[in-house]
Image (cartoon, helix red, strand yellow):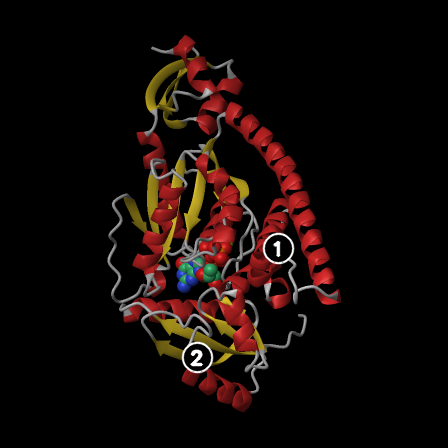
Amino acid sequence: MEQKEFEKVILVGCQTVEDDLHYEYSLEELESLTETAKGKVLATLTQKRDRAHPATYIGKGKVEELQALEEQLEADLIIFNDELSPSQVRNLSSSISARIIDRTQLILDIFAQRARSKEGKLQVELAQLQYLLPRLGGQGTQLSRLGAGIGTRGPGETKLESDRRHIRRRIDDIKTQLSVVVQHRDRYRERRKKNKTFQIALVGYTNAGKSTLFNRLTEADSYEENQLFATLDPMTRKMILPSGFGALMTDTVGFIQDLPTTLIAAFRSTLEEVREADLLLHVVDMSNADYFQHEQTVQKLLEDLEIQQIPQITVYNKRDSQHPDFVPTAKTETVLISAFEEDDRLKLKQKIEQTVIGLMEPYQVEVPSTEGKLLSQLKNETILRELSFHEEKQVYTCKGYALKDHQIYGQLNRYTV
Ligand SMILES: Nc1nc2c(ncn2[C@@H]2O[C@H](COP(=O)(O)OP(=O)(O)OP(=O)(O)O)[C@@H](O)[C@H]2O)c(=O)[nH]1
Ligand SMILES: [Mg+2]
């Protein structure tokens, strides 16, 4: 394994909300994010204020405390729990010598490390450039307000202007490339829609166990790790239900609270795939103390994406280490499992099958034994419940359920009894 130095980090938070618990969880999450980015948290500095200090985020006294702590711990990096304005970064930099980044930059950094598809990579770069543009040279806001007036001109500024032009060009370039990638994907999606394969999407908060389930349900090898945002690009594989019915399952990027706005825009299209799903499996980590908030965050995002009308099963995962305060509250169909347990995965598949049947029409047909292809299609493309052979008539009597808008449903008409 590659040797990687851990950066020494101090976290800084400003509690502006009354809700202590929510604040505490957001700091815990910042710590997990930091670890995911290979940082080691040495200390956390926090301050209660009505609102963040406009010039330095935390008050003057706290900045001094941070300075002392930085020296004492020899920190490499200070990570702030909220997005900092360009001027806050500038002011803080004058008294702090360690590098300063905010929550947004941290998330962008993790996304940059993890994006694998061409589209994912382009989207992350776009988000990074959009974040960077107003912060270039540390005085972006001032410059854009004043224009290139007296006192702002000089060799440095010229360089800055050309950097800006360069970044804007790159942004346009990425947008063009993205539109091509999206067209490709749309065409692929159209094709898949024509084939009318039943589609199931795994959605949920980051680290809920989506990829673990995806791997174990589809026997594929998606990237599964105890790190946040292990998956950034949707992956799709075939899954077989107990009856033999084949569906496509898609693994998606994890959701998170307070996702930076630049990233929401960028990753919306990654979740476009989810729109096409016939069924959503919402995976919730029931071992996490903040599971309820996570569940709400995901529901909210599903609403934003206007896909909350798609049938849903809430899959409470990590039953093996369930949190003592956990109570299932989802209004959808619910199942409690551990992704590691084979019996539980079977229970989940049965639940999925039940739900799929609920979306189907029952059928009863008599198929001549010569129709081998149709018979195997019935097994894979419908949910076949009963199959019996008649010696005299040389037909199979088949009972089951089929999706009305699937091709196979039309083919059954000829044999209906
Ligand atoms: N104890 C326990 N851990 C689990 C279970 N399922 C998954 N995990 C662990 O949870 C961690 C996260 O799993 P992933 O499958 O990567 O989670 P994810 O939802 O895909 O995360 P992102 O891709 O970041 O959104 C891994 O360390 C898994 O081994 C479970 O049933 N029980
Ligand atoms: Mg994943």
Q: Secondary structure at mark 1?
A: helix
> Which corner quadrant of the image does residue 57 belong to?
bottom left
What mark, if any, has residue 372 been given in the picture? none
**The N terminus lies in which quarter of the figure?**
bottom right
Q: Residues within 10 Å of mark 1 (few under 14, many from 20)?
A: some
The number of numbered discs placed on residues in the rendered structure image is: 2
- The relative height of residue 18 versus residue 266 in the rendered view (above or below) is below
In this view, the residue in front, 392 or 100, is: 100
The residue furthest right is 155
Q: Earlier in the sequence, mark 1 or mark 2?
A: 2
- The relative height of residue 187 versus residue 302 in the rendered view (above or below) is above
The amino acid on which the numbered mark 1 sits, given as a three-letter code, is: Leu
- Residue under numbered circle 2: 44
**The C terminus lies in which quarter of the figure?**
top left
* Residue 236 in sight from this viewpoint: yes
Q: Position of residue 96 (x, y in %)?
A: 55, 81
Q: Position of residue 286 (x, y in %)?
A: 33, 59
C-alpha distance separating marks 1 and 2: 29 Å
- The relative height of residue 219 versus residue 99 in the rendered view (above or below) is above
Q: Position of residue 284 (x, y in %)?
A: 36, 54
Name the side, left or right, on which 252 lies relative to 15: right
- Residue under numbered circle 1: 129
Which residue is depicted at the point 64% across and 48% down? 171
> Which corner quadrant of the image does residue 398 belong to?
top left
Q: Position of residue 177 (x, y in %)?
A: 67, 40
Q: Secondary structure at mark 2?
A: strand
